[in-house]
Amino acid sequence: YMWYDNLTGRPIPCWSCTAGEYVTLHCKEGAPESTECAACPEGTYTDMPNGLESCLLCAKCHNFNHHYMEAPCKPYSNTLCRCQGRMYKDGDVCVHCDSGYERHGIMGKQGPPESVDGEHCRKCPTGSFSFPSRGQDTCQSHTNCSALGQTLESAGTH
């Protein structure tokens, strides 16, 4: 990492601290290996080599938002919070997909609908529907009225 000397303002290249550590003393000019590091205190972490002067605060999983903790915070990795059931995580809130859609991808992983990591709400195929607000998170096929000897009065919409 590069830090700037407070007196001269010159950039000084230093060796980074490892994941799980932070800088307690920046290196001396001409001695990049002289960086001094310390372990992150409990409740904090750094997840990559760094030149940070303090560790980052660990995330907290909010049980009231349908979160659960999949992995606790460690000095070298943040807390991993997931969403329960067939919900997706939008910021700090776990939410259901809209009616006519179902969750697609890894359950509970961070990411809004249509996120780039492949986790999103997928539109129900033609001939099926869902009502997540009523606890029905997966797409269900419309009833085949003719197979039951009944007459179709109204086609399903989603």
Image (tube, grey):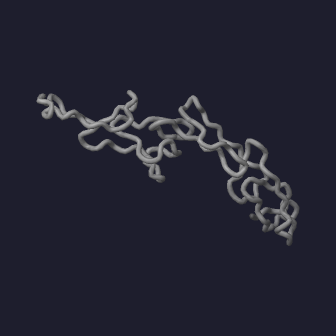
Q: Can you say whether 128 is above or below 119 in the image?
A: above
Residue plotted at (71% across, 60% down): 49
Q: Position of residue 65 (x, y in %)?
A: 55, 31
Q: Can you say whether 7 is above or below 110 in the image?
A: below
Compared across the picture, whether 154 is left or right of 7 comes to left
Residue plotted at (87% across, 66% down): 28
Q: Quadrant of residue 135?
A: top left
Compared across the picture, whether 18 is left or right of 114 comes to right
Residue plotted at (60% across, 33% down): 62
| 5 vs 90, nearest the viewer | 90
Q: Quadrant of residue 57?
A: top right
| 9 vs 137, nearest the viewer | 137
| 25 vs 142, nearest the viewer | 142
Q: Position of residue 146 (x, y in %)?
A: 13, 33
Residue plotted at (30% across, 36% down): 140
Quadrant where the N terminus sits is bottom right
Q: Residue furthest bottom?
A: 30
Q: Position of residue 46 (x, y in %)?
A: 71, 52
